[in-house]
Image (cartoon, grey):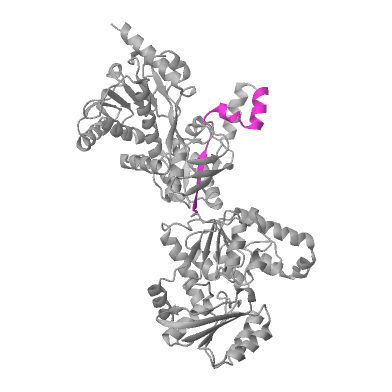
Amino acid sequence: MKTIINISLGSSKNDYSFNPHFMGMDFHVRRFGTDGDIERVADLLQEWDTKADAIGLGYVQFPYTIGPKRTMEKQTKTLYQLAERLNTPFTTGDALRQVGHEWTIRHIQYTFGNNYFNNSRVLFLSGMINSTLARALSEYTGNLNFCDPILEHGIPKFLNSYRDLELYARGLHGVLQWIPSKRFSNLAMPLKAYNKLIIRQAMRSANIIVIPYYDFYKFIGDYGVREIGGKTVITSTAYDDRVQFLKERGVDVIIDTTPKMLQSVIGVSVLEAMILVALGKTPQTLTSDDLLEVISQLHMDPRVIYPSGVKKRVNRFAFVVHPLSQDYLKKLKPIEMISRLTSNAAMNTIEKLMAYSPPFVYSKVTGIKSPTGVEAEGWLIAIGATPQQMLAHSPEFTNARLLKASKIAKNLGAQILGLGALTKAMGDAGVTVAKLAEIPVTTGNSYSASAILWATAEAVRRMGLIKMNKKKKLKGKTMVIGATGAIGSVCSKLLAVAFEEVYLVDIYDAKLLALKESIEHEIHNVKVDISTRVDRFVSDMDVIVTAASLSEKKMLDLSLVKPGCVITDVNRPLNFTLKDAKTRPDVLIIASGEISLPGKPEFKNIGLPPGVAYASLAEAIVLALEGRFESFSLGRDIKWEKVSEIYKMGLKHGMRLAYITGLEGVLKDEDFQRVRELAIRSRKLTP
């Protein structure tokens, strides 16, 4: 049996003695904590020299691995000097720690969907101590903040990148020009209080907090639930008391870079000492390849601890909102007051001015939880332009504001950005924004198409005027106006799956022929007709989808529409007004289908009932819950396969059709019943 002695400067409360079997050998492992007494360490080193097969020195502040040379704290240097007089091999575990830190980040990133750390806001209480972790994390996120200038020098400024940390380690960073005021910093209580305040604020904004193993309680002991509750903590050798400490403060996830290979939690110095003995190596002959082989063969993976006992993952999104009309602008308090005192002309001026306002965070979104257990949080970022103002300006005007919004989203830690602005106003439907933004972008068009047809299908069912054939297709006729457009082409294909006959209308004759050909090739048992005239077949239609802006000359004549027809207006701004709808009370006009979000969502009013979102917003949320941080819907060529895919993903994560919205708001049961009764009456009166 081989004897491994762990002599630690840490607390004696964590002492242990047990006999594990490891790497095919039997060991006796014993720990001696000295409560910071270095003379006691010297005595123990002398006592166990030659009696132990290897000695691990624990609770050591490891030499920094960043900067021009490996710098070492005074106490650590003393320990090394004492240990170098020994005949027994000794180790601090530094070699295993460096490999383990980088392995932790890469293993977690891959294991949890290859996106776990994407654009996370990470706060390092000491980047100098955890520089290996910082370097690895910098490959997945640029949202890094380091407290080193604050905690080492009392300078009230964070380092904001791994590059900053490198310059700081070399003594070249501009922040170090503040060092002459160090004595003042230590004496000035207001500055100390301010430094603590900005660290608290940084903790609250962070998604992940990296806490050094050495001096763990010194770094984190003064902070509570408000600062670290709901966070992910990365640390090393998480003893039970540390896990309990973090649990009491509401931490969601603890990532321990030290694998738990034995019955007790042991430090990296003990693990490395055991590996040395098992391989018959000394610290001088142990190579990186040796460690890689052992880590691989023994699956020495980092620990992921859920203190509450429930697995927790929170993904993050952002979404751009905008006022749909002047009426929405009037809901803003300052404008509401002004609107009461000014004329319509003045409101028109305000609407134009608001289009130039910079983006801002309108609301935090919380409480979204999928039935799978994954959660999502996010931010609604507002731009001031109404649809009319977006269309009045060039696409570059809108894209510039969306790119500013994307920077805000990136800095907040969002992993995907949904664009709620008009596809037409963006020119290339988000392609330019996606190329220039630093996080993935999606327009929401796929789920918008899915939701509007979801709402259409539900409206047809509730109206009860169309029957099914034996092949479960609706025995009716449907028309898509603007059929070759981005959403129109998708609507055409999905309606072809549900209806016996589909009529495609657009001004682009060659595109119509191509769309007809693709539908007939992909979908069976459907009759497809095409036309460049809106009025040609309109009187026979049971369902009409307007997916293009209709000019006055080409406006759908509601007087020709069949009683009981369901008209779905996909276009923004809407083609139809409330005045139009009142001319045909026996026709149902749908503006959109809204999505009910899973969990208990909380966010500011966006013109919908609580917990309900527009489909474009829901797309960003679905992708966040799924961990699909990609530009899912971009450009005008939307794939109907994606429409189907996002629909299925939405169902998986608990999305449901919440409401069918008409021109006056949410449609109720009595609205459907009224239109149905009027339609039946009108049909009886029709000769």
Q: Can residue 32 be seen in this view?
A: yes
**Quadrant of the image for the C terminus?**
top left
Can you say whether 464 is above or below 443 in the image? Answer: above
**Looking at this view, is 67 or 428 the one in front?**
67
Asked if residue 325 is among those painted magenta in the image, a careful observer would answer yes
Kindly give the residue lying farthest to the front in the view shown: 18
> Residue 569 sits in which quadrant?
top left
- The percent coordinates of residue 446 (x first, y second) are 38, 39
Is 524 placed left or right of 652 in the picture? left
Numbered range of the magenta stretch: 312-341
- The percent coordinates of residue 292 (x first, y second) are 41, 76
> Residue 671 sits in which quadrant?
top left
- Residue at 34% in and 19% down: 565
Can you say whether 32 is above or below 103 in the image? Answer: below
- The percent coordinates of residue 119 (x first, y second) are 50, 55
- Residue at 43% in and 29% down: 592
